[in-house]
Image (cartoon, rainbow, N blue to C red):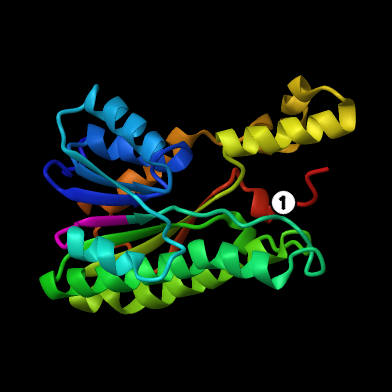
Amino acid sequence: MELGLKGRSALITGASKGIGLSIAEHLAQEGCNLHLVARSKGDLEAARERILGKHAVSVAVYPMDLAERGRAKVLAAKCPDIDILVNNAGSIPRGSVEEIDEDRWRQAWDLKVFGYINMSREFFRLMKARRRGVIINVIGNGGERLDAGYIAGGTGNAALMAFTRALGGSSAEVGVRVVGVNPGPVATERLIGLMQKEAQTRFADPSRWREFEKGFPFGRAATVEEIAATVALLASDRSAYTTGTIFTIDGGMVNRGSLI
């Protein structure tokens, strides 16, 4: 499907691997010029070369930690003409309210929760002035299926869902769309690593990690490409009447009973 994105510019955070890199590749395939942000300069350069080897687009990289105050302002100054902002950086650790102390909680929220809010604030201001633009927040279904064992992540994701709906609910008045995507389990390096660690703990054999997928919908985790394809569609004018809402991609997980 031709999405009509050729020549537009997109800034993607957490873009060096996993979902973020796949989003970058999908947008590049559609002809978007890219601005990639992540903490690792080496990983960003590798992502840049990978994309340039396949697509005739421009790719700029910005190695930085978005948990640090002022970084969103720096990016907005460097990339003032962005058409599409994809907030995707950050992961929040599992643990109960007793296990996640204040420092860990704040550190995780500084990158994901406040990182998304700060990036959205800066680029919404620029998009509002031009009366066009799209902000897509990749959040996570933990904000819908709340779990005391993922309390920092669940409450953080729920906050970002509310933020997305509130901002996107009125952004149409200034020509801007704000939407969210809630992935469930996705077969990223991080998830596979976590399952391998759990397989080592339970079975003393990390190669048995796929046994944990049996409880997932369709017997597997989502692919990064499935998430990225939805983000690309939402970024395009084919979704021009879509704002202030969240799209959940988890095989129906949040609406089913226990997975075990």
Q: Residue at x 80, y 50 (%)?
A: 258
Is residue 17 in the magenta section? no
On screen, 1 above or below 146?
A: above
Please rate how many residues cluster around mark 1, counting C-alpha atoms within 10 Å: few if below 14, some from 14 to 19, many from 20: few
Q: Quadrant of residue 49?
A: top left
Q: Is residue 43 left or right of residue 92?
A: left
Q: Residue at x 61, y 35 (%)?
A: 221
Q: How many marks?
A: 1
Could you say where residue 152 lies in the image, as x and y percent from the top left?
A: 67, 66
Q: Is residue 86 left or right of residue 142?
A: left
Magenta residues, dominant SS class: loop
Q: Is residue 185 left or right of residue 65?
A: right
On screen, 230 above or below 67?
A: above
Can residue 243 be seen from the camera position used here? no
Could you say where residue 18 lies in the image, as x and y percent from the top left?
A: 48, 37
Looking at numbered disc 1 in the image, what kind of residue is underneath it? Arg
Name the quadrant of the N terminus.
top left
Q: Residue at x 58, y 65 (%)?
A: 107
Q: Residue at x 49, y 62 (%)?
A: 111
Residue nearer the viewer, 258 or 118? 118
Residue, disc 1: 256
Could you say where residue 132 lies in the image, as x and y percent from the top left?
A: 16, 65
Could you say where residue 116 lies in the image, as x and y percent from the top left?
A: 42, 65
On screen, 122 above or below 256?
A: below
Dot 1 lies on which element? loop
Q: Is residue 188 left or right of residue 235?
A: right
Residue nearer the viewer, 49 or 94? 49
Magenta-drawn segment? 80-85
Is residue 84 in the magenta section? yes
